[in-house]
């Protein structure tokens, strides 16, 4: 059917007025990856490359209204969450997700902005673990977020693999722990799939201050590729190549922690190494 043949994706997240992170980064990613992007705003932030100056959660009933508007009209094939502000808003999103069919759900458990601002009330971590993760097809914590979810420090690569297992036991099928916050020569992300197989994606670490919105861009790219019908494994590898390009071909705007370049071409420097082989990697 012609009317719904374009892959349609929605981000359920916070707005970054500075355009580098949040749903603005998601929508730029959707555009770059040739899918039709939509947005459900959960919170507004007054933000720039220096940090977050103010934030304002959206009333629950307006979150409901946005879900209803999209569900009534579009054939959404994948979705992602980003900044969800607090427990009340996590619950509003969960309630709505249970009533719609927006395809695979990627949860980016955004907690603290790179500049240090709190984007999720600490009390809401338990709500994300108990209510949202069981609905998710994949979760994409960065290292500090993974440490909060599992409740202990994650230092070595073996800690990342163990943490992924612990997070999977919370009821989320596929776990992607991003290694951007480590200091090693490669930026390495660990992936544990639903079938128990696992692999690393690695790319050269780029020395840059332009990493504002990297996590948002990564999870948005995964959602975009899933909406096109790609397997989760292929979507993750594409997202890694997209990030390596977006970070390395930097864009310089603002005076603080700069954004990435969503026009960049995919990098060819991504290495994939299986930890356990499996004939049936998650599709
Ligand atoms: N300096 C860097 N060089 C190359 N890749 C990076 C760099 N920083 C982050 N990445 C990659 O960007 C993606 C997002 O990771 P990360 O920055 O850890 O997320 P978040 O924005 O949630 O903190 C991951 O694939 C990670 O490996
Ligand atoms: C609205 C919003 N959502 C997410 C982030 C996280 O991005 P980063 O960790 O790169 O600051 C952000 N800064 N603002």
Image: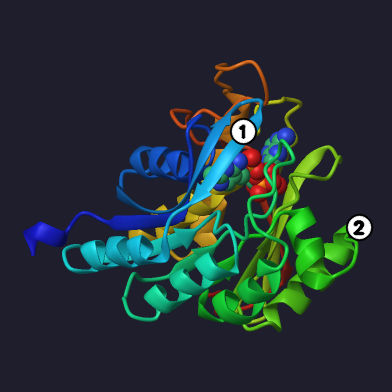
Indicate which label's residue lies in the foreground, 1 or 2.
Answer: 1
Ligand 2 in which quarter: top right
In this view, the residue farthest toward the left is 2
Q: Nearer the viewer, residue 227 or 167?
A: 167
* Mark 1 neighbour density, 10 Å: few (under 14) some (14–19) many (20 or more): few
Q: Callout 2: helix, strand or loop? A: loop
Is residue 44 visible to the viewer in this orientation of the structure? yes
User: Where, quadrant-wise, is the N terminus in this rendering?
Assistant: bottom left
x, y percent for residue 270:
63, 44
With respect to residue 144, does 203 lie above or below? Answer: above
Q: Are marks 1 and 2 in contact (CB under 8 Å)?
A: no
With respect to residue 153, does 51 lie above or below? Answer: above
x, y percent for residue 178:
70, 53
- Residue at screen point 82% across, 62% down: 147
**Residue where numbered disc 2 is placed:** 156
**Residue where numbered disc 1 is placed:** 53
Distance, label 1 to label 2, CA atoms, is 34 Å
Q: Nearer the viewer, residue 39 or 90?
A: 90
- Residue at screen point 68% across, 78% down: 168
206 left or right, relative to 240: right
Q: Callout 1: helix, strand or loop? A: strand
Res 250 label? none
Is residue 214 visible to the viewer in this orientation of the structure? no
Residue 88: quadrant of the picture: bottom right
* Mark 2 neighbour density, 10 Å: few (under 14) some (14–19) many (20 or more): few
x, y percent for residue 90:
53, 68
- Residue at screen point 74% across, 71% down: 164
181 left or right, relative to 153: left
- Reading the chain from its start, which is encountered first: label 1 or label 2? 1
Q: Does ligand 2 reach within 8 Å of label 1's beta carbon?
A: no
With respect to residue 192, does 245 lie above or below? Answer: above
Residue 127: quadrant of the picture: bottom right
């Amino acid at each position: 059917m012609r009317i719904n043949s374009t892959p349609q994706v929605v981000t359920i997240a916070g707005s970054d007025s500075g355009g580098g992170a949040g749903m603005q980064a998601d929508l730029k990613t959707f555009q770059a990856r040739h899918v039709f992007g939509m947005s459900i705003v959960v919170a507004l932030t007054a933000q720039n490359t220096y940090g977050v100056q103010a934030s304002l959660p959206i009333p629950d009933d307006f979150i409901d209204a946005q879900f209803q508007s999209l569900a009534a009209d579009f054939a959404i094939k994948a979705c992602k969450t980003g900044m969800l502000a607090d427990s009340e808003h996590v619950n509003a999103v969960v309630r709505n997700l249970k009533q719609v069919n927006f395809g695979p759900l990627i949860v980016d458990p955004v907690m603290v902005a790179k500049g240090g601002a709190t984007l999720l009330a600490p009390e809401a971590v338990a709500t994300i673990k108990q209510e949202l993760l069981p609905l998710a097809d994949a979760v994409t914590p960065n290292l500090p977020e993974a440490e909060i979810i599992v409740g202990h420090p994650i230092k070595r690569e073996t800690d990342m693999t163990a943490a992924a297992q612990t997070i999977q036991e919370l009821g989320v099928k596929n776990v992607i722990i991003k290694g951007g916050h480590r200091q090693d020569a490669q930026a390495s992300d660990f992936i544990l799939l639903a079938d128990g197989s696992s692999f690393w994606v690695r790319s050269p670490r780029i020395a840059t201050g332009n990493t504002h919105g990297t996590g948002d861009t990564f999870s948005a790219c995964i959602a975009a590729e899933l909406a096109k019908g790609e397997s989760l494994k292929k979507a993750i590898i594409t997202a890694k190549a997209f990030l390596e390009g977006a970070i390395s071909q930097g864009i310089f705007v603002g005076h603080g922690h700069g954004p990435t370049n969503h026009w960049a071409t995919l990098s060819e420097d991504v290495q994939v190494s299986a930890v356990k082989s499996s004939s049936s990697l998650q599709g």
